[in-house]
């Protein structure tokens, strides 16, 4: 009977794995629970003359329970993104990533190109806006904010809304 | 007469009696260089000789006494002037007088208490040294010999595993487990991470070992964190029900034992930081303290017991007939049924 078995057991380190429950086949091969895809696409310039502006389609597909709709599609313009960013900065503790620039210089007269309605500029902006939304919508803290859900899934933005946190039952 | 360089001077050096047989240990100095020093343990006797060698033979050396000290002290870098001595022993080797020729003095500090381990850190240093001094009116001649002390611990009686469920509500739930809470410096951290809920897009997961050196007290406490190791344990996105194993060999890293409130001056603590990183580079982490201790070298007593563990690992099962000393819990854990 060896009382010092603790010491002896240590001369070769015991590196055996700890016990793990075998994974359930449905969990292993089923759809992952983290599916969230956001696209910003189909830019469309509407209006005439000085009141023209561009909107983008914001499409969302997800299986995260925190989103009320598993699929949604809304149209948003650049100033809506600015609104979202300001709301998130104020209401949440998230470090909100920057938006692509406002490009005020493109709104000055006497430009050789189409200014803010220039195709390549719109495409650049579209890509940046898409990156911005993907970064933000995947953030667990941002997902708790009412403004994010309103931006992504409500038909139109109610800028007079009462900021609040989403609570799940 | 001595300030014009005409006076007698001497070289002094300290030699240990067991210099041939005593082991040396590597210790990093403040500037990062690694040097070897004689290794001592608590309670060991420190004995040797002090050699005073006159520079100009024939001339006499007047002095106010020859002594040797054994000192253990803590030095805070932001307060260099104040050395906090926690061990201070002195032996007078010669009374004030004069030396007419080079001389050797024997000394012995019997069963010296060395309560703390030698430590050189970012903001504090704890060292032990012998200092031989020939006192003189205007300037002393002295020599220091640094030694290194290691503190050994015995196998902890209670060494519970660390097991916890953590997460962010409705986003990420994991259960992590480390097989022990106290690890020796050449130990292996064996553990696992079990995913209960994954609603974020994870890119990879790593374990970091963080050393935290704390100096100062009260409102002047200062923590210095240093990431000693980053060890990736998973690459890719896990799903619910998946278990990721951890096997982290500590011998590869330069670490010291955990030091708690040493002489009320400083602490050195170690933490395991489990970090998950998602596709947007967001980091989710959980820090857990572990206790590190230093094990003395063990004489191998039985080859058969080691062979048993090795074969169990290979076969992936435990063998109840051969291992009456293994606990039953381990038998169940390794079952491959």
Image: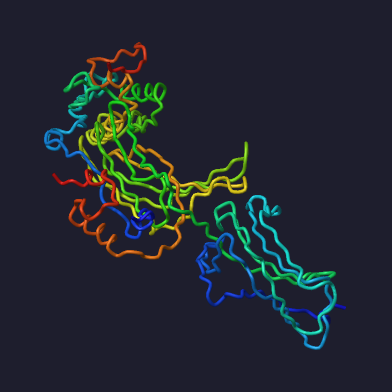
Residue at the outermost front position:
A1
Q: Position of residue A27 (x, y in %)?
A: 15, 34
Q: Residue at x 37, y 15 (%)?
A: A163
From this viewpoint, is residue A115 visible? no
Q: Residue at x 69, y 58 (%)?
A: B88
Quarter placement of the N terminus of chain B? bottom right
Work out whether A7 lies above or below A99: below
Q: Residue at x 54, y 66 (%)?
A: B39
Q: Position of residue B57 (x, y in %)?
A: 78, 87
Q: Position of residue A140 (x, y in %)?
A: 31, 28
Instruction: Decide if residue B323 is on the left or right side of residue A10.
Output: left
Instruction: Decide if residue A115 is on the left or right side of residue B297.
Output: left
Work out whether A167 lies above or below B92: above
Along the line of sight, the residue nearer the viewer: B96 or B174: B96
Query: What sort of colour scheme is used for the picture?
Result: rainbow
Hey, which quadrant is residue B311 in on the image? Answer: bottom left
């Amino acid at each position: 009977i060896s009382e010092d078995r603790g010491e002896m057991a240590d001369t070769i380190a015991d590196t055996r794995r700890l016990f793990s429950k075998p994974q359930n086949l449905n969990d292993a091969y089923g759809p992952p629970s983290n599916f969230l895809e956001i696209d910003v696409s189909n830019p469309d310039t509407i209006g005439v003359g000085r009141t023209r502006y561009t909107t983008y389609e914001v499409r969302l597909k997800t299986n995260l329970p925190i989103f009320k709709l598993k699929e949604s599609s809304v149209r948003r313009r650049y100033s809506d993104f600015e609104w979202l960013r300001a709301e998130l900065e104020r209401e949440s503790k998230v470090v909100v990533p920057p938006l692509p620039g406002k490009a005020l210089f493109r709104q000055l007269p006497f430009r050789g190109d189409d200014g803010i309605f220039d195709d390549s500029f719109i495409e650049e902006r579209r890509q940046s806006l898409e990156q911005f939304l993907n970064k933000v919508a995947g953030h667990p803290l941002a997902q708790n904010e009412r403004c994010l859900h309103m931006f992504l899934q409500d038909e139109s933005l109610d800028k007079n809304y009462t900021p609040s946190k989403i609570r799940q039952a | 007469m001595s300030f014009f360089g005409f006076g007698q001077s001497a070289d002094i050096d300290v030699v240990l009696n067991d210099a041939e047989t005593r082991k040396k240990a590597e210790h990093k100095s403040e500037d990062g260089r690694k040097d070897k020093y004689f290794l001592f343990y608590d309670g060991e006797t420190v004995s040797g000789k002090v050699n005073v060698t006159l520079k100009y033979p024939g001339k006499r050396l007047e002095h106010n006494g020859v002594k040797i000290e054994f000192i253990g002290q803590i030095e805070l870098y932001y307060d260099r002037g104040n050395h906090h001595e926690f061990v201070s022993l002195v032996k007078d080797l010669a009374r004030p007088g004069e030396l007419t020729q080079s001389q050797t003095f024997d000394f012995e500090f019997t069963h010296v208490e060395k309560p703390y381990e030698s430590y050189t850190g970012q903001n504090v240093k704890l060292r032990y040294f012998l200092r031989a001094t020939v006192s003189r009116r205007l300037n002393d001649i002295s020599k220091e010999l640094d030694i290194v002390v290691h503190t050994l611990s015995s196998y902890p009686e209670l060494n519970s595993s660390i097991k916890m469920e953590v997460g962010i509500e409705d986003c990420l739930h994991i259960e992590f487990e480390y097989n022990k809470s106290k690890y020796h410096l050449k130990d292996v951290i064996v553990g696992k991470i079990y995913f209960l809920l994954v609603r974020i897009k994870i890119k990879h997961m790593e374990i970091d070992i963080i050393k935290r050196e704390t100096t100062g007290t009260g409102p002047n406490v200062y923590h210095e964190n240093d990431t000693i190791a980053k060890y990736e344990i998973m690459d890719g996105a896990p799903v619910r029900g998946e278990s990721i194993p951890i096997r982290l060999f500590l011998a590869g890293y330069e670490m010291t034992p955990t030091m708690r409130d040493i002489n009320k001056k400083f602490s050195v603590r170690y933490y395991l930081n489990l970090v998950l990183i998602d596709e947007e580079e967001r980091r989710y982490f959980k820090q857990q303290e572990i206790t590190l201790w230093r094990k003395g070298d063990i004489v191998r007593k039985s080859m058969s017991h080691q062979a048993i563990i090795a074969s169990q690992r290979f076969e992936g099962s435990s063998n109840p007939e051969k291992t009456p000393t293994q606990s039953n819990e381990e038998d169940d854990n390794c079952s491959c049924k």
